[in-house]
Amino acid sequence: MKNSIKNLLRAGVFVLAAVFAFAFTQSVSNQPAYQQINGVWTEVSNLNYDCDREIEEVCTYASPDFSTPLEMGKFELQ
C-alpha cells in the first residue's frame, strides 16, 4: 500500500511539473513583439528575425509603448 501511494505521488509530481513547464514556456510566443527598424517602431512578430543572445541589450519589446522588454539580445532581421 505504501509503495503504490509513493508511486502515485511521484507520478503526480511529474505530471504537475510537465504542465507547469508547458504553461510557462508557451505564453511568450503568443505576444506581439516590437522593435525599431530604420527609425520606425514596428511590430515584428510576423517578420523573420533573430535575437543574438550573446549581447546584453533589449531585442524586442512586449508592448507598443516600448517600455516592457520581451527578449534580450541584439535584434537582427534575416
Image (spheres, rainbow, N blue to C red):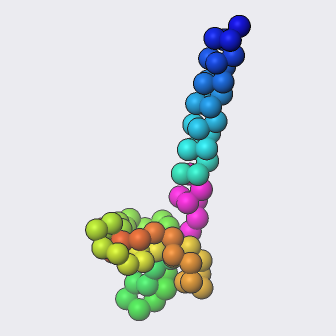
Q: Is residue 75 visible?
A: no
Q: Position of residue 11 (x, y in %)?
A: 61, 24
Q: Position of residue 63 (x, y in %)?
A: 59, 77
Task: Name the side, left or right, on which 6 lies relative to 48.
Answer: right
Looking at the picture, tell me which residue is in the foreground, 59 or 38: 59
Q: Quadrant of residue 28?
A: bottom right
* Residue at (48% x, 65% y) in the render: 46
Magenta stretch, residue numbers: 26-33
Does the magenta-highlighted stretch encompass residue 68? Answer: no
Looking at the picture, tell me which residue is in the foreground, 76 or 8: 8
Q: How many marks?
A: 0
Q: Tell me the quarter of the image containing the N terminus.
A: top right
Task: Name the side, left or right, on which 3 lies relative to 46.
Answer: right
* Residue at (41% x, 74% y) in the render: 59
**Measured along the vertical axis of the image, is residue 2 above or below residue 63?**
above
Q: Is residue 21 visible?
A: yes
